[in-house]
Every structure is written in structure tokens, then in C-alpha cells.
């Protein structure tokens, strides 16, 4: 560690070489010393070694020194000091990440109370994606990742329950018939309606999940007949006599037990308006 006045006098070669080596030593040690070097001018950066294990990096602005950071030799870390350095992100109004944020097992909160905690699975390939939305649209929480089919699980603690403070609903979606048959993907359309265009039969639904409920509203646009695949089990093992009258509606609800869709509710012969 060294400092120098950065003035090399006119002198004999041996003395010149010594003087030059001292200049290079000062440069190589960042002008280290326990006080500002006498040669300092506006823009000089120097290392204050008053503390040998935690020296302070300083910048001379021509009038005084600005302390930039302390260098912790034991921990091999830099501790920024000046208020204009946004090490805690307080003064950075638009911080950006250059890579993945590692919370190191800690929670995100207000500094004293935990707001959000993360648990990481070493073999994970699936995750959440959160997307904001423009005016008139809803923000979206999606399951994404490496798998083709990814669901979402909600788990409470102890006897806690999942509470919705506002209306929760499954959007109703249309089922259409083709060649007198209706294909029903229960994963995509658990709450469905069918506007009749022909006499038709509900085929065995695809993508069933044990314990799932599905509902269908049948609107008769003409006096069409309706039938169901044998995978649908009706009360008393007998299908109802469907209304099949123009302008009327039948509503049916089923629950899947792992093998068949059991009827759990029906309301027939309703007016459509």
C-alpha cells in the first residue's frame, strides 16, 4: 500500500527508477493510506486504510471526500455507504433483475411482518405465471411449466377454509351436436349448455376426474329428443322423460365416482324466459 505526489523530478536514473516504481505502487494499491494523498485532485479515488480490515473507498471532489463503501476483508463483501447508492432499492424507483431472484429461504414483507413465503422443490418444472390486464379485463393467475397438463392446488392450514368474499362461478360454455352425438370435455366445459339442433345423444364425457361435478342446461330449439350414454347413471337407474318441447329447458347435474357419472340433481320443463 502506498501513496505518491505523482511528481517525478529531474534526477539520476537510479533515483528516477525508484520514483517511478513508487508511482506505480501508489496506483497499484489505489492510493492507500490513512489520510487523503497530498497529490489528490478532483476525481481522485483513494483507499482509507485507517481500519486495516475494513478500509473505506473514498472519492475526492476537490473540496472534500465522499465515502463510497467499506470493504470487509473478512467477509469479502462491499458495504455501500453513500445515500445516493440504492443498495436497499429504496432510491431506485424502477429496479430490474438481471436474473432469477433468490430469496434464500426468506419471506417477502414490510421488513417486520411476513407477507409472502416461497417453497422450492428441487425437481420442479412447473410454476405460476401472473399476468396483468388492460381496461375491462381481469388479471390472470396461470399454471405453467414443462408438463403438458398442469393443475393448481389450494391448501389451507389446519381446519382453515378457503373463503371467497365475492361471487365465484364457472363460465357456462356451449356443447354442440354432430351426427346426432355430443362430445363433452368435462375439464374444459364443466358448466355447459346445449341448444338442440337435432335428435342427439350425450356421449361418454372425456377427461373425467373422480369427485368432479358437471352441469348441463338443455335448451330445446324445436321438439328434439335427448338420450345419454350408459356411463350416466340416473336416479332409479332410469333416465327421465326429457321435455323435448320447443322453448323449454332441462337442467341436469352429475358427480363422477371414478367409474360413472351419477345424477345428483335435475330440474325439468323450465321456461327459457
Image (cartoon, rainbow, N blue to C red):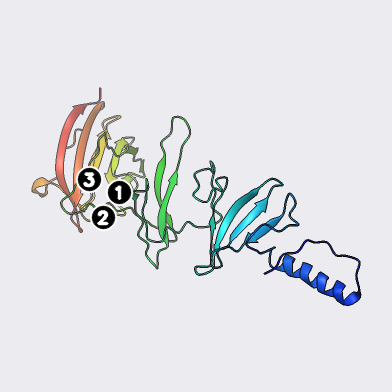
Does residue 189 sit above or below 78 in this rendering? Answer: above
Q: Residue at x 40, y 64 (%)?
A: 124
Rendered view: 47 above or below 197? below
Provide the residue designation for mark 2. 209
Coordinates of residue 199 in the picture (x, y in percent): 29, 39
Kindly report the distance in space between the C-alpha atoms of the residues bearing marks 1 and 2: 9 Å
Q: Tell me the distance, in whole angstroms, between the alpha carbons under discs 2 and 3.
A: 21 Å
Quick one: SS at disc 2? loop
Task: Give the class, few, some or many, for how many residues have Cα within 10 Å of label 2's Cα (few <14, many ≥20).
Answer: some
Q: Compared with residue 195, is residue 49 higher up or lower down, i.e. above or below?
A: below
Q: Nearer the viewer, mark 2 or mark 3?
A: 3
Residue that protrudes farthest toward the left in the picture: 236
Q: Is residue 199 visible?
A: no
Q: Quadrant of residue 197?
A: top left
List x then y, in percent, for residue 81.
54, 52
Locate residue 36: give its quadrant. Answer: bottom right
Q: Earlier in the sequence, mark 2 or mark 3?
A: 3
Q: Residue at point 22% right, 56% down?
A: 210
Q: Position of residue 227 (x, y in %)?
A: 23, 44
Q: Nearer the viewer, residue 139 or 192?
A: 139
Q: What residue does disc 3 label?
A: 162
Discs 3/1, front:
3
Quarter of the image where one finds residue 220: top left
Instruction: Give the mark nearest the N terminus, 1 or 2.
Output: 1
**Cβ atoms at labels 1 and 2 below 8 Å apart:** yes
User: Which residue is tagged 1?
Assistant: 186
Q: Residues within 10 Å of mark 1 (few under 14, many from 20)?
A: some
Q: Tell me the element at label 1.
A: loop
Amino acid at each position: 500500500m502506498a501513496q505518491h505526489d505523482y511528481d517525478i523530478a529531474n534526477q539520476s536514473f537510479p533515483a528516477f527508477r525508484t520514483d517511478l516504481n513508487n508511482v506505480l505502487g501508489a496506483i497499484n494499491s489505489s492510493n492507500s493510506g490513512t489520510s487523503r494523498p497530498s497529490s489528490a485532485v478532483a476525481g481522485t479515488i483513494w483507499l482509507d486504510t485507517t481500519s486495516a480490515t475494513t478500509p473505506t473507498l473514498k472519492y475526492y471532489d476537490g473540496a472534500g471526500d465522499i465515502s463510497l463503501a467499506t470493504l470487509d476483508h473478512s467477509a469479502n463483501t462491499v458495504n455501500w455507504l453513500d445515500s445516493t447508492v440504492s443498495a436497499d432499492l429504496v432510491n431506485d424507483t424502477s429496479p430490474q433483475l438481471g436474473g432469477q431472484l433468490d430469496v434464500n429461504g426468506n419471506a417477502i414483507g414490510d421488513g417486520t411482518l411476513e407477507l409472502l413465503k416461497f417453497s422450492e422443490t428441487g425437481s420442479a418444472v412447473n410454476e405460476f405465471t401472473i399476468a396483468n390486464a388492460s381496461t375491462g379485463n381481469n388479471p390472470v393467475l396461470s399454471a405453467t411449466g414443462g408438463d403438458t397438463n398442469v393443475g393448481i392446488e389450494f391448501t389451507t392450514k389446519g381446519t382453515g377454509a378457503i373463503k371467497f368474499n365475492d361471487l365465484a362461478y364457472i363460465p357456462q360454455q356451449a356443447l354442440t351436436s354432430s351426427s346426432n352425438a355430443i362430445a363433452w370435455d368435462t375439464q374444459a366445459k364443466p358448466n355447459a349448455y346445449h341448444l338442440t339442433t337435432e335428435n342427439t345423444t350425450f356421449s361418454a364425457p372425456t377427461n373425467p376426474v373422480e369427485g368432479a361435478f358437471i352441469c348441463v342446461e338443455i335448451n330445446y330449439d324445436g321438439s328434439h329428443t335427448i338420450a345419454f350414454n350408459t356411463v350416466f347413471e340416473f336416479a332409479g337407474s332410469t333416465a327421465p322423460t326429457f321435455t323435448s318441447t320447443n322453448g323449454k329447458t332441462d337442467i341436469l347435474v352429475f358427480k363422477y365416482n371414478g367409474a360413472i357419472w351419477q345424477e345428483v340433481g335435475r330440474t325439468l320443463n323450465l321456461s327459457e324466459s
